[in-house]
Image (tube, rainbow, N blue to C red):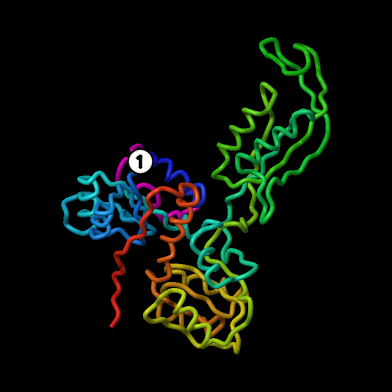
């Protein structure tokens, strides 16, 4: 089947919006031109020369990785290190390299949610919800057109609150206006004051969808000059953020819990701090270098906090509340390839999707 690279990336970004990445990050297209047709996609945690060679051998011209190849800026491409050599190789082989990093971590159906699924956590929520990401749209529309407008706003992505969708607040009232000589009013007459029965429609939306929602409003509103406002909200966005916390179906003893952690992540070895509770029930998780969230895990009442790596003093500082468990940075994010595969295969079930067989983990164990 003929699918453009851009279409595949659009599908991925619908679930893992680039707007959710942290300010220091560099997710998105790293190398290549997304306008061409995709011959196949290889999914990996990291980009290395071996991974790129694997893509070519599999007939894939698109590589989607969790970690960006170009995380820091480079000023020359001379082949002096593996990053530069990867760029050179990708260009020569006409490969497109894409990264979904902290946007995949923070997304409401992202990496940490997948990790929570593996532990069957219940009543999950972000450990550190994102802030300054929500807007409220307030607009006014004739009563007979309110339903059509609401549906168009919902279809554009507005109106999601927690586990609910198609949310709106509607207040009936009357609007007044007088059309000028150059106007072409939908109702009323030029030069005469008109009063119209209207509905004030309010919906919540993430900030990154503002343009799409605004276009839906303009295209589906009957007035020549619709009146509307986008109001920034200080509310935390409980559908996206760093880390995740939830409850195990049943409380288990720490030793059994640690064995389960090791098995789920396929870790050769794990590290953990003292545990101050006899049973583990509430668990917090953050893939990668997430130890900075241990205080959030404590505030959330977590008995254990799993992440990829931590500093030596972090194991002291937690004081067993919660038990800090580290499984290795690579091991904690290996499930990113499974996440990407789910998203792409769900939309394109017959497309050629490969999970990399190359272990790019730079850390070796004896």
Count neighbours of disc 1 (C-alpha within 10 A) and say few if under 14, some if 14 to 19, many if 20 or more: some
Out of 327 and 228, give the one closest to the viewer.
Answer: 327
- Residue at 39% across / 71% down in the picture? 331
Q: Which residues are magenta?
A: 19-37
Q: Nearer the viewer, residue 203 or 116?
A: 116
For image coordinates 75% across by 33% down, the residue present is: 146
Query: Where, by quadrant of the figure, is residue 313 drawn?
Result: bottom left
Q: Is residue 257 above or below residue 166?
A: below
Judged from this view, the residue extending furthest toward the top is 181
Q: Quarter holding the N terminus?
A: top left
Residue 23 image point, x, y percent: 45, 54
The quadrant holding residue 361 is bottom left
| Residue located 68% across and 37% down the image | 151
Q: Residue at x 72, y 18 (%)?
A: 186
Asked if residue 35 is among those painted magenta in the image, a careful observer would answer yes
Disc 1 element: loop
Chief secondary structure of the magenta span? loop
Please tell me whether residue 358 is drawn above or below residue 74 in the rendered image: below
Out of 287 and 179, give the one closest to the viewer: 287
Horizontally, residue 307 falls left or right of residue 65, namely right
Q: Position of residue 273 (x, y in %)?
A: 47, 85
Asked if 133 appears above or below 121 in the picture, the reply is above
Total count of labels: 1
Q: Is residue 46 magenta?
A: no
Question: On the rendered structure, is 27 left or right of 116?
Answer: left
Rendered location of residue 252, percent (x, y): 59, 84
Picture coordinates of residue 106, whole percent (x, y): 51, 58
Q: Is residue 143 above or below residue 239?
A: above
Name the residue carrying label 1. 34
């Amino acid at each position: 089947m003929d699918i453009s690279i851009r279409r595949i990336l659009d599908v991925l970004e619908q679930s893992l919006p680039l707007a959710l990445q942290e300010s220091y990050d560099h997710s998105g297209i790293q190398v290549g031109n997304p306008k061409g047709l995709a011959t196949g996609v290889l999914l990996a945690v990291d980009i290395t020369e071996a991974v790129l060679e694997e893509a070519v051998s599999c007939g894939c011209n698109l590589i989607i990785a969790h970690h960006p190849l170009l995380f820091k800026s480079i000023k020359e491409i001379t082949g002096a290190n593996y990053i530069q050599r990867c760029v050179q190789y990708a260009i020569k082989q006409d490969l497109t390299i894409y990264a979904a990093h902290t946007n995949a971590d923070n997304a409401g159906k992202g990496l940490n949610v997948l990790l929570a699924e593996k532990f069957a956590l219940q009543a999950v929520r972000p450990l550190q919800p994102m802030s300054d990401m929500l807007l409220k749209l307030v607009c006014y529309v004739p009563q007979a057109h309110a339903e059509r407008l609401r549906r168009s706003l919902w279809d554009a992505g507005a109106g999601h609150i927690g586990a609910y969708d198609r949310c709106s607040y509607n207040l009936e009232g009357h609007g007044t206006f007088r059309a000028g000589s150059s106007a072409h009013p939908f109702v009323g007459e030029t030069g005469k004051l008109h009063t119209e029965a209207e509905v004030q429609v309010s919906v919540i939306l993430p900030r990154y969808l503002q343009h799409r929602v605004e276009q839906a409003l303009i295209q589906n509103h009957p007035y020549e000059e619709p009146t509307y406002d986008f109001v920034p909200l200080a509310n935390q966005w409980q559908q996206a953020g760093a880390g995740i916390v939830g409850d195990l179906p049943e409380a288990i003893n720490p030793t059994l819990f640690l064995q389960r952690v090791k098995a789920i992540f396929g870790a050769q070895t794990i590290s953990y701090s003292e545990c101050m509770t006899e049973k583990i029930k509430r668990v917090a998780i953050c893939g990668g270098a997430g130890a900075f969230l241990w205080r959030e895990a404590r505030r959330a009442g977590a008995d254990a906090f799993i992440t990829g790596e931590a500093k030596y003093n972090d194991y002291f500082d937690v004081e067993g509340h919660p038990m800090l468990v580290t499984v290795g940075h690579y091991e904690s994010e290996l499930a990113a390839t499974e996440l990407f595969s789910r998203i792409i295969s769900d939309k394109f079930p017959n497309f050629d999707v490969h999970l990399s067989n190359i272990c790019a983990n730079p850390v070796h164990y004896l």
